[in-house]
Image: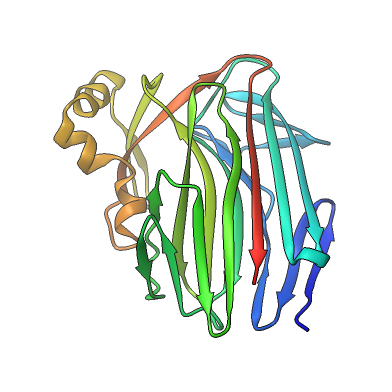
Amino acid sequence: MTRLVADIVDHRLLRGQYGPFGFGNWGFEASDRQSFLTLSETSRHVTRTGDVFEFAEGSWRLEYQTIPDPDHNLIRITARLTALRDGILQDGVIRLVFDKDAIDCGTLAGQTYRHRNTGRYRLFATRHVTLSGTGHQIDITLDHADGAGRFDPYMYLRDEGDLWIVHARMLPSAPEDVIWLRWANRLFTVTAPEAVARFLWQNRVGKALLWRLRERWGRHAPEIQAVPLNILRRGQSLQMEVTCRFR
């Protein structure tokens, strides 16, 4: 009988196995225009004190838990990011990572993808991603999402290196408070004036082209994209609950 094994430290899954499926380095991410919080890699421009994280453009309390249920071959992840003062965010993410070896394909929003190491963020307003291998399947569902009326739920699937990466992601809903249009390279980053970014965003063609362009096109795309951000007021939260089921 196949059994789920999970190594969890400080509420974060470090490594797990279910039959042929290896997975691990799961965590939470959030960002504004300068700061990037991650529990699984290296944060940038973030200061942590316990469960409080100081960003360049906000102060946040993160409540994050990983709850294994080996009897039912599932793992549940919950996250609540609460504003300690008014702050601005471009996203909040529960991040799950799987070894590609035993996974033949991934499916979301009715589309099936093979691993081609594209680095593309295949992002859809959906709540379900499936990873399939010979004789087994992984279902990841976003069971609960509350963005305080300012963020909407999405999921994405990315084929990167030797990994499949799945994000349950909260992104700003309209009307957006800030449109951040920037071009970055290894030497410098240029940010367009808000009036210019807003003008392009209000043009349907401009929005369709520039919205998270680098993410959608993959690693070979130019480092230019438009990213909306919304403000959460003091006491408001992003909340998510994700379940990963192994079959």
Horizontal arrangement in the rendering, residue 178 relative to residue 153 (left or right): left
The image shows residue 165, relative to residue 22, as above or below, that is above
Which quadrant does the N terminus fall into?
A: bottom right
The image shows residue 87, relative to residue 146, as above or below, that is above
Q: Nearer the viewer, residue 105 or 16?
A: 105
The image shows residue 168, relative to residue 2, as above or below, that is above
Horizontal arrangement in the rendering, residue 19 relative to residue 230 (left or right): right
The picture quadrant where one finds residue 224 is top left
Q: Total number of numbered labels?
A: 0
Horizontal arrangement in the rendering, residue 149 relative to residue 177 (left or right): right
Q: Residue at x 84, y 58 (%)?
A: 9
Q: Residue at x 65, y 14 (%)?
A: 234
Which quadrant does the C terminus fall into?
A: bottom right
Residue 42 in view, yes or no: no
The picture quadrant where one finds residue 63 is top right
Residue 240 % position (x, y): 63, 39
Residue 60 % position (x, y): 69, 27
The picture quadrant where one finds residue 192 is top left
Q: Residue at x 37, y 49 (%)?
A: 187
Residue 124 in view, yes or no: yes
Horizontal arrangement in the rendering, residue 87 relative to residue 4 (left or right): left
Q: Nearer the viewer, residue 141 or 124?
A: 141
Q: Residue at x 83, y 36 (%)?
A: 50
Residue 92 % position (x, y): 56, 38
Residue 88 % position (x, y): 53, 24
